[in-house]
Image (tube, rainbow, N blue to C red):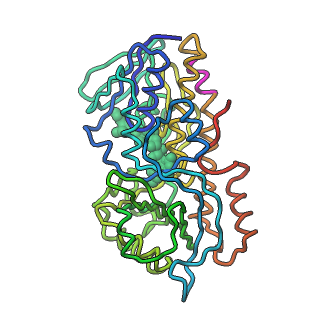
């Protein structure tokens, strides 16, 4: 199928990839409607993509060449080891075939790779979409309406397109939060030798939570990125109705004090000091949510990335999944003769994949936060069977290979 007009709501990871896919597949007109004004590249978080997924995505063109990435090969699991052991006691080590990315640099690479024919409109806030049978309508916050042959929702966690595809489906709060932070890796010099190889991810484990620490590339050199999952203070009382309730620099004193107490009580001294190198302006708190949708298409509407499924971050699959959605969309387009065939093929390719990732990440969250095992007393065999039970038959974390 060739020709047609496509609007992509949201111009982040999924949005850029989907717009590129539509342009490559042969759409006449592709418009990205992004609500923010120019600040997307500043989001500056770390994320990881599994090497297997990255190779597939590079081969399809969904992951452009030349984006800065940091190679990771091993994941070490440590617990506090009183009274000795500044770095904690290593109780397990496993392969970790991933590369880490800086969110802003990944976004910039995807944005720059978007074909010139794609119109990327910033400050375009979409207030709703409607499937009219033969076309789809987009309502903009200014009051205007635009019509396209297809509207793709790449508008993330609180998608307005999802509301039209699966009315009433809302992300569910998992009952815990993550503190996230990052800092210039040169600050590590202040800590002395902590025996932390650059290609190694460390997971600090404690009762009721865990913390993942790894290096990422940054605009001004390597950075250290960490994500600490635990129950918030006075669980249930904080207003976790927004994924960015406590943005950088605006974390409350209560949440900061709670983090400090966790570091004092649960962390090996080296890792507590390491997290302490983070500036308040680079620390924030996000509640953890997830959502699985019954379908990813309806009429001339389609969902991709976090708009389609919100997966808890433990699975380290969100960016790869968004790029896979774009790849599946492009393949479905090339194989289809009509819009109906395209949407049917996309749903068939991506519906189950999203639901399986949500289920796996729930198991990972249960095992690493909600119902943590007695890590400190487990032997090697026990840790491995605990991990296999969490995987529940999946080959690994990081998302699944795409169907050939
Ligand atoms: C704590 C945390 C850790 C994570 N760690 C990892 C990891 O290690 N590895 C990994 O792969 N992924 C990770 N992820 C997930 C990953 O960041 C996302 O899954 C991925 O970026 C795909 O996002 P997206 O493009 O679908 O949505 P988003 O990045 O949320 O983008 C949605 C876009 O739509 C725009 N928008 C929203 N509403 C409207 C509207 N009404 N009108 C116009 N525009 C709109 C927004 O401004 C935004 O630019 C993590 C996520 C979290 C929260």
Q: Is residue 168 left or right of residue 75?
A: left
Q: Quadrant of ligand 1?
A: top left
Q: Answer above or below: position of 379 versus 31.
A: below
Q: Quadrant of the C terminus?
A: top right
Q: Quadrant of residue 9?
A: top left
Counting from the top left corner in percent of width and height, residue 322 is at: 50, 37
Report the side of 232 relative to 219 (left or right).
right
Question: What's the magenta bit mostly, secondary-structure-wise?
Answer: helix
Classify residue 112 by image quadrant: top left
Q: Position of residue 62 (x, y in %)?
A: 50, 32
Q: Is residue 344 magenta?
A: yes
In this orientation, which residue lies closer to the viewer: 165 or 104?
A: 104
> Toward the viewer: 74 or 263?
74
**Is residue 163 covered in magenta?**
no
146 or 271, which is in the foreground? 271
Q: Nearer the viewer, residue 138 or 21?
A: 21
Q: Position of residue 183 (x, y in %)?
A: 36, 62
Residue range (magenta): 342-348
Q: Is residue 157 visible?
A: no
Q: Is residue 392 visible?
A: yes
Query: Is the residue 200 above or below the residue 264 in the image?
Result: above
């Amino acid at each position: 199928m060739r020709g047609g007009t496509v609007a992509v709501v949201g111009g982040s990871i999924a949005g850029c990839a989907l717009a590129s896919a539509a342009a490559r597949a042969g759409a006449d007109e592709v418009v990205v409607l992004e609500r923010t004004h120019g600040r997307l590249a500043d989001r500056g978080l770390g994320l990881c993509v599994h090497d297997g997924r990255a190779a597939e995505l590079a081969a399809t063109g969904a992951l452009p060449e030349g984006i800065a990435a940091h190679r990771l090969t091993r994941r070490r699991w440590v617990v506090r080891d009183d009274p000795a052991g500044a770095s904690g006691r290593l109780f397990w080590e496993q392969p970790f075939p991933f590369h880490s990315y800086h969110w802003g640099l990944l976004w910039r690479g995807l944005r720059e790779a978007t074909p010139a024919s794609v119109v990327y409109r910033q400050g375009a806030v979409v207030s709703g979409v409607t499937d009219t049978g033969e076309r789809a309508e987009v309502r903009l916050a200014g009051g205007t309406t635009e019509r396209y042959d297809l509207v793709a929702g790449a508008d993330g966690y609180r998608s307005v397109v999802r509301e039209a595809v699966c009315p009433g489906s809302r992300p569910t709060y998992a009952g815990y939060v993550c503190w996230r932070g990052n800092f210039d890796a040169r600050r590590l010099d202040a800590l002395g030798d902590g025996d932390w190889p650059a290609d190694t991810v460390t997971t600090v484990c404690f009762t009721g939570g865990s913390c993942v620490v790894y290096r990422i590339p940054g605009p001004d050199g390597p950075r250290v990125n960490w994500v600490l999952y635990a129950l918030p203070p006075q669980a249930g009382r904080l207003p976790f109705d927004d994924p960015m309730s406590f943005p950088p620099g605006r974390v409350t004193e209560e949440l900061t004090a709670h983090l400090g107490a966790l570091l004092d009580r649960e962390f090996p001294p080296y890792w507590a000091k390491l997290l302490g190198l983070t500036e308040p302006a680079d620390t924030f708190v996000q509640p953890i949510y997830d959502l699985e949708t019954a379908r990813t298409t309806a009429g001339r509407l389609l969902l991709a990335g976090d708009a389609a499924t919100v997966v808890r971050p433990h699975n380290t699959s969100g960016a790869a999944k968004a790029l896979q959605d774009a790849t599946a969309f492009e393949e479905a387009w090339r194989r289809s003769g009509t819009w109906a065939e395209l949407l049917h093929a996309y749903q068939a390719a991506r519906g189950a994949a999203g639901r399986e990732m949500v289920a796996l990440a729930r198991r990972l969250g249960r095992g690493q936060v909600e119902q943590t095992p007695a890590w400190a007393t487990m032997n090697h065999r026990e840790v491995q069977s605990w991990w296999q039970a969490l995987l529940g038959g999946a080959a690994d974390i990081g998302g699944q290979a795409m169907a050939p």
